Amino acid sequence: NAGVTQTPKFQVLKTGQSMTLQCAQDMNHEYMSWYRQDPGMGLRLIHYSVGAGITDQGEVPNGYNVSRSTTEDFPLRLLSAAPSQTSVYFCASTQRRGELYGYTFGSGTRLTVV
Amino acid sequence: AQSVTQPDIHITVSEGASLELRCNYSYGATPYLFWYVQSPGQGLQLLLKYFSGDTLVQGIKGFEAEFKRSQSSFNLRKPSVHWSDAAEYFCAVFTGGGNKLTFGTGTQLKVEL
């Protein structure tokens, strides 16, 4: 089925470890974003991309890196995991004029940093 | 700066009762507004959206929302709630400069049988 695929679904990391959260979409969407969801805080934007080769910071970018080498993929890298990065991470994508269509979300990655 | 406020953190309604979830936004230009629903352990599903025209918009699962510019509100309603509607609901406004969504903090809906 077409959509946004995130892997892994669950992950436990030790403080200081690094890892990459994968996100892929097969809808040829130009815009992709990463959000983190924390209780009582809704979803906050980490990084976003308006097309291959173009990325920018969102509201809470510290401790995360992204790249966009293809239209389909938008991985999120944690360079040195910290307990404060324990969260649920969502990847989302939309097409041009996304304000008319809204974003399509992946099913999320639940990350625990111990 | 744009923002979205959902003043109710938790709401409990009885099955069959009507529902209204509140959402207020702050955005300088014409807002593009969305409601998403998140079932436990799941991603976010789009319920409905507003970007122009009729201020009462219909969505999936029997939900509707009314845009009121004078009150900067976009409240979500359902005439008769089903037990399967228990979930968390998020209001969001679409902002330019990268097509970003700014979310409210969410309202957790509990349905009593």
Image (cartoon, rainbow, N blue to C red):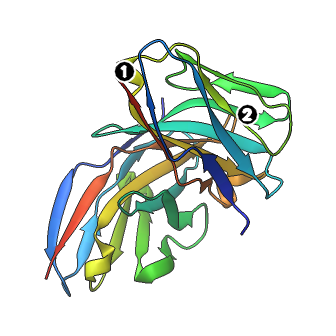
Which residue was labeled with disc 1?
A84
Near mark 2 (Cα within 10 A), the count class, few <14, some 14-19 or many ≥20, is many
To which quarter of the image does residue A77 belong?
A: top right
**Residue at 42% in and 70% down:** B65
Which amino acid, mark 2? Ser
From the viewer's perspective, is B82 left or right of B111? right
From the viewer's perspective, is A72 left or right of A8? right
Measured in 3D between alpha carbons, the distance from the residue under mark 1 to the one under mark 2, in whole angstroms, is 24 Å
Question: Eyeballing the image, is A105 above or below B12?
Answer: above
Towards the viewer: A112 or B32: A112
Image position, residue B45 (x, y; %): 51, 63
Q: Nearer the viewer, mark 1 or mark 2?
A: 1
Image position, residue B50 (x, y; %): 55, 63
**Which label number is shown at residue A33?**
none
Q: Secondary structure at mark 1?
A: helix
Q: Earlier in the sequence, mark 1 or mark 2?
A: 2
Image position, residue B39 (x, y; %): 38, 63
Which amino acid, mark 1? Ser
Chain holding disc 2: A
Which quarter of the figure is the C terminus of chain B placed in?
A: bottom left
**Which label number is shown at residue A49?**
2
Question: Eyeballing the image, is B14 above or below A92?
Answer: below
From the viewer's perspective, is B13 left or right of A3? left
